[in-house]
Image (cartoon, coloured by chain):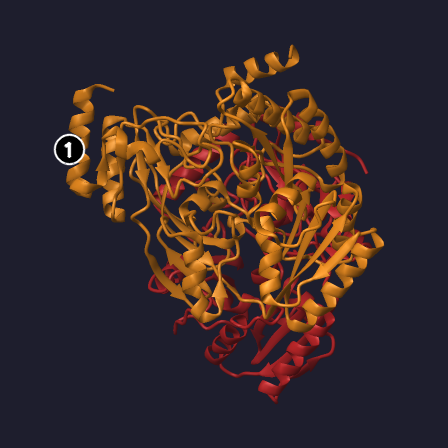
Chain colours: A orange, B red
Amino acid sequence: MSRDKKAVLEMAFRQIVGEGFVISDKETQKPYECDGLSMYCEESMLVVLPGTVDQLKEVIRLCRIHEVPVVTRGAGTGLSAGAMPAPDGIVLSTARLNKIIAIDEKARTARVQPGVRNISISEAAGRYGLYYAPDPSSQIACSIGGNVAENSGGVHCLKYGLTVHNVQKAELILVDGTEITLGGDGLDVPGFDLLALIIGSEGLLGVVTEITVRLLPRPESVQVVMAAFDDVTQAADAVGSIIAAGIIPAGLEMMDRYAISAAEDFCSAGYPKDAEALLLCEIDGSESEVHEHCARVAELFKTHAATSIRISASEEERTLLWKGRKSAFPAVGRISPDYYCMDGTIPRSKLAAVLTAMSEMSDHFGLRVANVFHAGDGNLHPLILFDNSVPGEFERAEAFGASILELCVSVGGCITGEHGVGMEKIRQMPIQFSDSEIALFHELKHCFDPAGLLNPGKGVPLLKHCQEYRAARQFA
Amino acid sequence: MPDITSQLLEQVLEARLERRCLQIVGGGSKEHYGRPSRGSKIELSGHQGIISYQPDELVLTVRCGTRIEVIQALLAEKNQMLASDPPQYNGAATIGGSVACNDSGPGRPWTGSIRDSVLGIQLITGKGDKLQFGGRVMKNVAGYDVSRLQCGAMGCMGIVSEVSLKVMPRPAHSLTMKLEINSHIDALEHMSLLARSAYPISGNCWIDGIQYVRFEGAYSAVEKAAKDYARLFPDANELRDGSSFWGSVRDHHHSFFRSSRRLWRLSIHPTAQYSELEPGLIDWSGAQRWIPGEHNMTEMVAALSPIGGNASLIKGGIGEEDVFHPMDEGSQRLHVALKSKFDPDRIFNPGRMYSWL
């Protein structure tokens, strides 16, 4: 990027979005260099923060004319380097597009701008007794636009679904300026389901400028049953038996010994530190239903040899029991200088085998690993502990991570359950997809963004890189 | 049950070579839906069978020609079901056709559509490639969501030859209450009120001056909801044979569907009101409305333009007329572009969805 081009564009962007909303100096750009996966860093040419949808459209128009790559960024809490800047492009921040446009109490929907924080929707809908169900761990910070880009989940998605199940309509702008409404005011729309295609497309196909999400009535009652096990297989079987009994918990989380111990040291939730596995099972619904199901779940835990069982008796106790799980990541952060969070999904029946294999890998790579697991839906988050200041440790953590992803695919799972491919897992895509499938992904991208300006280099690997990766693995 | 994927691939390659179009046919239960297509038939009803079913993982993988009735019976043995309750149309409906039409039952607003439960597919493209997208796990965000893109695409991009779905437990208890409400405007108000409650509702519909609400879920929760409802609306009473009523709405056996008039289906904001189009049946808590009448598409589009929503002509389409609500130019361009990537020679179901697709 020539200095002249940068200066010309900077001036043009300033005219669109206002003086204070184009960041060009290195210092102020610093926070935009990476998302939540801080090992992947890059400096962009400029950061542009439009304050209105019209400004955003103008910014995109200018990028198209000058062929400037665009990396759209929400709150930057992503965990796959999906928002890592392109060096010759702009970061298009939606942070200022943060208005809740309307809440339709009768239709139970909220119309929001992409920069609105996930939790703000539930806060605003609370006065009508409604809430927005998907709740990623980062929900106090992450934006709904980012949730759409990643098809974010959260601890409640076994029962309430992912972002794709909770978005009804979205306004999309393509890089050529075409504006399209995806979905509609009703539940189904004739034609191809472009809304489903956009959700989880990681900012590669278009820029979403408005989103209508579905809201749910707040359940009357919520409780948590916690159980400890001295065997991981027993815990996994207990999860299977809850599902087989016809109960769909609102949340069903598992932690392994490392994670339990770190979380307990961090926030004293009362977790038994000698347990091999801990389950947290949240039940919601009417008072009587919650009562009935909690008793049944406790019974099932008992038959699977739980070493201790605790049912929350109050909202405070429920919050405390969750606190340990919710702070598992920072808790692990305290016992290791750095950690690397993975995101594979596996069939739950393979959990014990996967954990055993992972423990062998841990020995092989000489790095510790702690596991938190969305047990209900098979989404595993191994946290690899390492020290970035030790030369070669990050590379070893990365190699360990890649082996975990391969393991997930080999047992019938996938390389990412909710964090997305981004820059981070792009090399592992050929484990899960054939060349023809990846070629089709490129063709889909071409339908929306023929010049390849949106989030270049992310999500879908080049075919030649796939062949190289496969060849390298063969000889590894 | 046989796996005939290789024969299907051969037929596609042959058709492509001969530049011959193919009409994709499953159980033949959805001929009323969409426009007439052309070309020779490619029959999927022989491609049947359950590939795997793991009740405690809530995951089912089946071949596309498997009938919904067969699937639901198998799942019922483990006290599970296809949550979207797709229409069975006298037992003829298949899972492939239900995915292609994204066909859902009366519980759609609460239990989701079939699109919501799809986890992965095997797709035969117009190039004769056999591709896999998604998987057999609940969460999978690698690559674009090509699986859900096929739901409702009416086979225009390819043949969904296998599908993996998330299944759900059957509710422990089900109870339907009915209440006389003469005007559809009052019924919409009533539905909206119910939908905002936290009761375990799984059906909310109005027909022939009667409002029906179905409560499903844990025994205690259902009983409480029905009791509260009866207290709030003393004229309401329980419908004894609830399942046959909901089945008649789902499968279009209800007398309402027997009329010889054209029948429009609106997908619309659940509380939208308009004077021109009087619904004969309101379902999905107001979000789906059925309008009998001789209107044409231009009239429907004009009537809906001030309030939003879209119209589909479900019965009584004449000749070549378009039966689905027209879309904006940008979306239309994307449809054509996407079709060209999956099916470059346009062999699958030409014109079945739109005259231009």
**SS at mark 1?**
helix
> Residue lying farthest bottom?
B234
Image quadrant in which you'd find residue A302: bottom right
Identify which residue is drawn at 25% across, 20% down.
A1
Where does residue A466 sit, x and y in percent of width and height? 55, 18
Identify which residue is drawn at 43% across, 70% down.
A127
Where does residue A411 sit, x and y in percent of width and height? 72, 31
Say which chain tag 1 marks. A
Residue A130, visible in the rendered structure:
yes
How many residues crowd mark 1 within 10 Å: few (<14), some (14–19), many (20+)?
A: some
Looking at the image, residue A114 lies above or below residue B19:
below
Q: Is residue A41 left or right of residue B243?
A: left
Looking at the image, residue A5 lies above or below residue B176:
above
Residue denoted by label 1: A11
Where does residue A5 sit, x and y in percent of width and height? 19, 23
Looking at the image, residue A239 lies above or below residue A404:
below
Along the line of sight, the residue nearer the viewer: A315 or A205: A315
Q: Is residue A242 left or right of residue A433?
A: right
Along the line of sight, the residue nearer the viewer: B77 or A467: A467
Screen quadrant of the N terminus of chain B: top right
Q: Is residue B251 left or right of residue A462?
A: right
Along the line of sight, the residue nearer the viewer: A194 or A153: A153
> Residue lying farthest top?
A475
